[in-house]
Image (tube, rainbow, N blue to C red):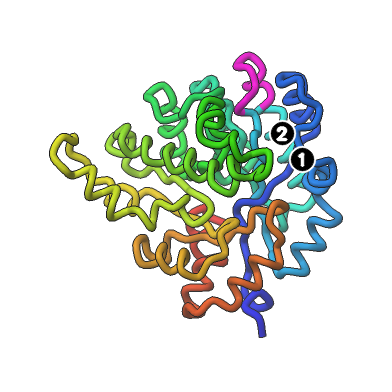
Amino acid sequence: MSIFDTEQVIAIEEHYIDPNITKLQEESTKNTKIRNPKMVARMEDFGGERIEEMDAAGIDVQILSIAPPGIHNLPGDVAVDAAKMTNDYLAKKISENPKRFRAFASLPMQNPEAAAKELERSVKDLNFVGGMIHGLTNSKFDDGKESWPVYETAAKLDVPIYLHPGMPHHEVRKTYYQDYTEEFALFQQAAWGYTVETATMAIRLVLSRVFEKIPNLKIILGHLGETLPFLLWRVNHNLKRPGNAPIEFREVFCNNFYVTTSGNFSDPALLCCMQEMGVDRILFAIDWPFIDNKLGADWFENISISREDKVKILNGNASRIFKL
Protein backbone atom coordinates (compact mmCIF):
# COMPACT_ATOMS: atom_id res chain seq x y z
CA MET A 1 0.00 0.00 0.00
CA SER A 2 1.25 3.47 -0.86
CA ILE A 3 2.52 5.67 1.95
CA PHE A 4 0.35 8.38 0.39
CA ASP A 5 -2.69 6.28 1.31
CA THR A 6 -1.70 5.68 4.92
CA GLU A 7 0.00 8.92 6.00
CA GLN A 8 -1.12 12.52 5.99
CA VAL A 9 0.69 14.41 3.21
CA ILE A 10 1.35 18.13 3.57
CA ALA A 11 2.66 19.96 0.50
CA ILE A 12 4.03 23.35 1.44
CA GLU A 13 4.87 25.28 -1.76
CA GLU A 14 1.62 25.31 -3.69
CA HIS A 15 0.28 28.40 -5.39
CA TYR A 16 -2.82 30.48 -5.95
CA ILE A 17 -3.59 33.67 -7.85
CA ASP A 18 -5.74 36.56 -6.66
CA PRO A 19 -7.37 38.20 -9.71
CA ASN A 20 -7.26 41.57 -7.97
CA ILE A 21 -3.47 41.33 -7.61
CA THR A 22 -3.16 40.24 -11.24
CA LYS A 23 -4.98 43.42 -12.22
CA LEU A 24 -2.63 45.54 -10.11
CA GLN A 25 0.39 43.81 -11.65
CA GLU A 26 -0.91 44.46 -15.15
CA GLU A 27 -1.54 48.12 -14.34
CA SER A 28 1.90 48.63 -12.79
CA THR A 29 3.83 46.88 -15.58
CA LYS A 30 1.53 47.86 -18.48
CA ASN A 31 1.61 44.18 -19.40
CA THR A 32 -1.68 42.35 -19.95
CA LYS A 33 -0.03 38.99 -20.65
CA ILE A 34 1.79 38.26 -17.42
CA ARG A 35 0.95 34.53 -17.43
CA ASN A 36 -0.67 31.81 -19.49
CA PRO A 37 -4.48 32.15 -19.06
CA LYS A 38 -4.92 28.40 -18.53
CA MET A 39 -2.36 28.46 -15.70
CA VAL A 40 -4.07 31.49 -14.20
CA ALA A 41 -7.44 29.72 -14.25
CA ARG A 42 -5.96 26.70 -12.44
CA MET A 43 -4.50 28.88 -9.69
CA GLU A 44 -7.67 30.92 -9.28
CA ASP A 45 -9.56 27.67 -8.61
CA PHE A 46 -9.70 26.41 -5.03
CA GLY A 47 -12.18 23.58 -5.45
CA GLY A 48 -12.31 21.84 -8.82
CA GLU A 49 -9.14 20.63 -10.52
CA ARG A 50 -6.98 21.58 -7.55
CA ILE A 51 -8.79 19.24 -5.15
CA GLU A 52 -9.19 16.51 -7.77
CA GLU A 53 -5.45 16.52 -8.45
CA MET A 54 -4.63 16.60 -4.75
CA ASP A 55 -6.86 13.58 -4.16
CA ALA A 56 -5.47 11.68 -7.13
CA ALA A 57 -1.92 12.10 -5.83
CA GLY A 58 -2.75 11.50 -2.15
CA ILE A 59 -2.04 15.06 -0.98
CA ASP A 60 -4.14 16.02 2.03
CA VAL A 61 -3.09 19.61 2.72
CA GLN A 62 -1.65 22.39 0.59
CA ILE A 63 0.04 25.34 2.25
CA LEU A 64 -0.84 28.06 -0.20
CA SER A 65 1.15 31.09 -1.31
CA ILE A 66 0.54 33.64 -4.02
CA ALA A 67 2.30 32.83 -7.28
CA PRO A 68 5.34 34.91 -8.17
CA PRO A 69 5.86 37.78 -8.58
CA GLY A 70 3.28 38.21 -5.85
CA ILE A 71 3.30 41.83 -4.75
CA HIS A 72 7.06 42.36 -4.91
CA ASN A 73 7.08 44.35 -8.14
CA LEU A 74 4.29 46.71 -7.09
CA PRO A 75 4.94 50.35 -6.18
CA GLY A 76 5.51 50.93 -2.49
CA ASP A 77 2.36 52.99 -2.07
CA VAL A 78 0.29 50.12 -3.50
CA ALA A 79 1.99 47.10 -1.94
CA VAL A 80 0.84 47.49 1.68
CA ASP A 81 -2.86 47.59 0.83
CA ALA A 82 -2.36 44.88 -1.80
CA ALA A 83 -0.83 42.54 0.78
CA LYS A 84 -3.73 43.02 3.16
CA MET A 85 -6.21 42.53 0.35
CA THR A 86 -4.73 39.28 -0.92
CA ASN A 87 -4.15 37.85 2.55
CA ASP A 88 -7.80 38.52 3.40
CA TYR A 89 -8.83 37.01 0.06
CA LEU A 90 -6.79 33.87 0.75
CA ALA A 91 -8.11 33.56 4.31
CA LYS A 92 -11.67 33.65 2.98
CA LYS A 93 -10.91 30.94 0.43
CA ILE A 94 -9.30 28.74 3.08
CA SER A 95 -12.29 29.19 5.39
CA GLU A 96 -14.39 27.44 2.76
CA ASN A 97 -12.23 24.28 3.01
CA PRO A 98 -10.05 24.60 6.13
CA LYS A 99 -9.09 20.93 6.33
CA ARG A 100 -7.31 21.07 2.96
CA PHE A 101 -5.55 24.44 3.03
CA ARG A 102 -3.23 26.60 5.13
CA ALA A 103 -1.28 29.67 4.03
CA PHE A 104 1.83 31.81 3.90
CA ALA A 105 1.24 35.56 4.10
CA SER A 106 2.17 37.92 1.31
CA LEU A 107 4.50 40.57 2.74
CA PRO A 108 4.90 44.13 1.44
CA MET A 109 8.69 44.22 1.77
CA GLN A 110 8.68 47.65 0.12
CA ASN A 111 7.76 48.83 3.64
CA PRO A 112 9.33 46.41 6.17
CA GLU A 113 7.61 47.94 9.19
CA ALA A 114 4.24 47.47 7.51
CA ALA A 115 5.30 43.99 6.37
CA ALA A 116 6.10 43.03 9.96
CA LYS A 117 2.67 44.22 11.09
CA GLU A 118 1.00 42.34 8.24
CA LEU A 119 2.86 39.16 9.13
CA GLU A 120 1.69 39.46 12.74
CA ARG A 121 -1.90 40.15 11.66
CA SER A 122 -1.87 37.23 9.24
CA VAL A 123 -0.56 34.80 11.84
CA LYS A 124 -2.65 35.96 14.79
CA ASP A 125 -5.90 36.93 13.08
CA LEU A 126 -5.93 34.82 9.90
CA ASN A 127 -4.17 31.73 11.31
CA PHE A 128 -1.47 31.72 8.62
CA VAL A 129 1.65 29.61 9.23
CA GLY A 130 4.36 32.07 8.15
CA GLY A 131 5.32 34.56 5.48
CA MET A 132 6.76 34.38 1.98
CA ILE A 133 9.20 36.68 0.19
CA HIS A 134 9.29 36.46 -3.63
CA GLY A 135 12.81 37.24 -4.78
CA LEU A 136 13.89 40.83 -5.18
CA THR A 137 11.60 43.60 -3.98
CA ASN A 138 11.62 46.21 -6.71
CA SER A 139 15.15 45.11 -7.73
CA LYS A 140 16.52 44.97 -4.18
CA PHE A 141 17.47 42.05 -1.92
CA ASP A 142 15.69 41.91 1.44
CA ASP A 143 18.71 41.21 3.67
CA GLY A 144 19.54 44.75 4.80
CA LYS A 145 18.89 45.91 8.35
CA GLU A 146 15.89 47.89 7.17
CA SER A 147 14.22 44.53 6.44
CA TRP A 148 15.04 42.99 9.80
CA PRO A 149 11.75 43.97 11.52
CA VAL A 150 10.09 41.28 9.41
CA TYR A 151 12.55 38.64 10.59
CA GLU A 152 12.29 39.80 14.20
CA THR A 153 8.52 39.46 14.02
CA ALA A 154 8.73 36.01 12.44
CA ALA A 155 11.02 34.84 15.24
CA LYS A 156 8.79 36.39 17.90
CA LEU A 157 5.78 34.58 16.43
CA ASP A 158 7.84 31.39 15.94
CA VAL A 159 6.91 31.10 12.27
CA PRO A 160 9.21 30.68 9.25
CA ILE A 161 9.85 32.92 6.29
CA TYR A 162 9.85 31.13 2.94
CA LEU A 163 12.28 32.57 0.37
CA HIS A 164 10.59 31.90 -2.95
CA PRO A 165 12.28 32.69 -6.27
CA GLY A 166 11.45 35.76 -8.24
CA MET A 167 12.65 37.15 -11.54
CA PRO A 168 16.36 38.08 -11.58
CA HIS A 169 17.37 41.73 -11.63
CA HIS A 170 16.78 43.28 -15.06
CA GLU A 171 20.50 43.97 -15.56
CA VAL A 172 21.31 40.36 -14.67
CA ARG A 173 18.72 39.14 -17.16
CA LYS A 174 20.24 41.36 -19.81
CA THR A 175 23.84 40.31 -19.16
CA TYR A 176 23.45 36.65 -18.21
CA TYR A 177 20.40 35.33 -20.01
CA GLN A 178 18.97 37.38 -22.86
CA ASP A 179 21.13 35.74 -25.56
CA TYR A 180 19.24 32.49 -25.01
CA THR A 181 15.83 33.39 -23.64
CA GLU A 182 14.11 33.60 -27.01
CA GLU A 183 14.90 29.94 -27.59
CA PHE A 184 14.94 28.82 -23.93
CA ALA A 185 12.41 30.98 -22.10
CA LEU A 186 12.88 29.34 -18.69
CA PHE A 187 16.69 29.72 -18.66
CA GLN A 188 16.34 33.02 -16.76
CA GLN A 189 13.60 31.57 -14.57
CA ALA A 190 13.11 28.08 -13.14
CA ALA A 191 15.86 26.40 -15.17
CA TRP A 192 18.62 28.54 -13.64
CA GLY A 193 18.00 32.24 -12.97
CA TYR A 194 15.60 31.67 -10.09
CA THR A 195 18.10 29.40 -8.35
CA VAL A 196 20.96 31.90 -8.61
CA GLU A 197 18.90 34.79 -7.25
CA THR A 198 17.36 32.84 -4.37
CA ALA A 199 20.61 31.19 -3.32
CA THR A 200 22.28 34.60 -3.39
CA MET A 201 19.57 36.01 -1.14
CA ALA A 202 20.05 33.13 1.30
CA ILE A 203 23.82 33.64 1.43
CA ARG A 204 23.39 37.38 1.87
CA LEU A 205 21.05 36.77 4.81
CA VAL A 206 23.75 34.77 6.56
CA LEU A 207 26.45 37.33 5.76
CA SER A 208 24.20 40.14 7.04
CA ARG A 209 24.52 38.53 10.50
CA VAL A 210 20.78 38.68 11.05
CA PHE A 211 20.99 35.22 12.63
CA GLU A 212 23.41 36.51 15.25
CA LYS A 213 20.80 39.01 16.37
CA ILE A 214 17.84 36.64 15.79
CA PRO A 215 19.20 33.14 16.44
CA ASN A 216 15.79 31.42 16.35
CA LEU A 217 14.84 32.79 12.90
CA LYS A 218 13.66 30.01 10.56
CA ILE A 219 14.09 30.32 6.80
CA ILE A 220 12.75 27.88 4.19
CA LEU A 221 14.19 27.36 0.71
CA GLY A 222 12.44 25.40 -2.00
CA HIS A 223 13.84 23.16 -4.72
CA LEU A 224 16.00 21.22 -2.24
CA GLY A 225 17.85 24.31 -1.10
CA GLU A 226 18.55 26.11 -4.39
CA THR A 227 21.89 24.18 -4.79
CA LEU A 228 23.24 25.36 -1.42
CA PRO A 229 23.30 21.96 0.38
CA PHE A 230 25.52 20.65 -2.45
CA LEU A 231 27.83 23.68 -2.11
CA LEU A 232 27.90 24.03 1.68
CA TRP A 233 31.44 22.75 2.16
CA ARG A 234 32.86 24.98 -0.56
CA VAL A 235 31.01 28.14 0.47
CA ASN A 236 31.90 27.60 4.11
CA HIS A 237 35.56 26.81 3.38
CA ASN A 238 36.12 29.85 1.21
CA LEU A 239 34.42 32.21 3.64
CA LYS A 240 36.95 31.03 6.25
CA ARG A 241 40.01 31.80 4.13
CA PRO A 242 42.16 34.85 5.00
CA GLY A 243 40.57 38.13 4.02
CA ASN A 244 37.10 37.24 5.29
CA ALA A 245 35.43 38.36 8.48
CA PRO A 246 34.81 35.47 10.88
CA ILE A 247 31.53 33.69 10.22
CA GLU A 248 30.22 30.13 10.61
CA PHE A 249 28.25 29.87 7.38
CA ARG A 250 27.70 26.12 7.40
CA GLU A 251 26.66 26.08 11.04
CA VAL A 252 24.16 28.90 10.54
CA PHE A 253 22.73 27.34 7.40
CA CYS A 254 22.22 23.94 9.02
CA ASN A 255 20.74 25.47 12.19
CA ASN A 256 18.39 28.06 10.69
CA PHE A 257 17.38 26.84 7.23
CA TYR A 258 14.93 24.23 6.03
CA VAL A 259 14.49 22.97 2.48
CA THR A 260 11.58 21.53 0.53
CA THR A 261 11.35 19.07 -2.34
CA SER A 262 9.40 21.49 -4.53
CA GLY A 263 10.16 21.07 -8.21
CA ASN A 264 13.36 19.06 -7.66
CA PHE A 265 12.48 15.38 -7.63
CA SER A 266 16.03 14.05 -7.65
CA ASP A 267 17.25 11.11 -5.55
CA PRO A 268 20.87 12.36 -5.31
CA ALA A 269 19.76 15.90 -4.45
CA LEU A 270 17.48 14.66 -1.64
CA LEU A 271 20.17 12.36 -0.26
CA CYS A 272 22.67 15.23 -0.33
CA CYS A 273 20.26 17.38 1.72
CA MET A 274 19.74 14.56 4.20
CA GLN A 275 23.48 14.09 4.62
CA GLU A 276 24.30 17.78 4.96
CA MET A 277 21.30 19.04 6.94
CA GLY A 278 19.53 16.01 8.39
CA VAL A 279 16.09 14.69 7.55
CA ASP A 280 14.42 16.86 10.21
CA ARG A 281 15.03 19.92 7.98
CA ILE A 282 13.37 18.62 4.82
CA LEU A 283 9.70 19.13 3.94
CA PHE A 284 7.56 17.79 1.13
CA ALA A 285 6.34 20.14 -1.59
CA ILE A 286 5.29 19.94 -5.22
CA ASP A 287 5.26 23.53 -6.61
CA TRP A 288 1.75 23.10 -8.02
CA PRO A 289 0.58 23.90 -10.67
CA PHE A 290 3.98 24.50 -12.28
CA ILE A 291 4.81 20.87 -11.46
CA ASP A 292 2.30 18.02 -11.56
CA ASN A 293 1.30 16.51 -8.19
CA LYS A 294 1.59 12.95 -9.49
CA LEU A 295 5.16 13.47 -10.67
CA GLY A 296 6.28 14.43 -7.17
CA ALA A 297 4.20 11.79 -5.41
CA ASP A 298 5.42 8.96 -7.63
CA TRP A 299 9.04 10.02 -7.19
CA PHE A 300 8.79 10.22 -3.42
CA GLU A 301 6.92 6.93 -3.18
CA ASN A 302 9.79 5.09 -4.85
CA ILE A 303 12.85 6.77 -3.35
CA SER A 304 15.03 4.41 -1.30
CA ILE A 305 14.94 5.95 2.16
CA SER A 306 13.39 4.57 5.33
CA ARG A 307 9.67 4.81 5.97
CA GLU A 308 10.42 6.74 9.15
CA ASP A 309 12.30 9.37 7.16
CA LYS A 310 9.53 9.52 4.56
CA VAL A 311 6.94 10.20 7.23
CA LYS A 312 9.05 13.03 8.65
CA ILE A 313 9.31 14.64 5.24
CA LEU A 314 5.65 14.10 4.31
CA ASN A 315 4.10 15.44 7.51
CA GLY A 316 6.16 15.21 10.70
CA ASN A 317 8.50 18.11 10.08
CA ALA A 318 5.77 20.38 8.74
CA SER A 319 3.50 19.56 11.70
CA ARG A 320 6.30 20.49 14.08
CA ILE A 321 7.47 23.65 12.35
CA PHE A 322 3.98 25.01 11.61
CA LYS A 323 2.38 23.61 14.79
CA LEU A 324 -0.37 21.93 12.77
Tag 1 and tag 2, C-beta contact below 8 Å: yes
Number of other residues with Cα within 10 Å of mark 1, as a class: few under 14, some 14 to 19, many 20 or more: few
In the rendered structure, which amino acid carries the disc numbered 2? Answer: Asp
Residue 117 in sight: no
In the rendered structure, which amino acid carries the disc numbered 1? Answer: Lys
Q: Which residue is mark 2?
A: 88
Q: For this view, does 284 lie left or right of residue 147? A: right
Residue 189 magenta-highlighted: no
Element type where label 2 sits in the image: helix
| The quadrant where residue 274 appears | bottom left
- The residue positioned 49% from the left and 41% from the top of the image is 161
Q: Which quadrant, please, contains the C terminus? A: bottom right
Main SS of the magenta part reads helix
Q: Nearer the viewer, residue 181 or 44?
A: 181
Number of other residues with Cα within 10 Å of mark 2, as a class: few under 14, some 14 to 19, many 20 or more: some
Q: For this view, does 125 lie left or right of residue 292? A: left
> Percent position (x, y) of residue 83?
65, 28
Element type where label 1 sits in the image: helix
Q: CA distance from mark 1 to mark 2?
A: 6 Å
Label annotation for residue 9: none
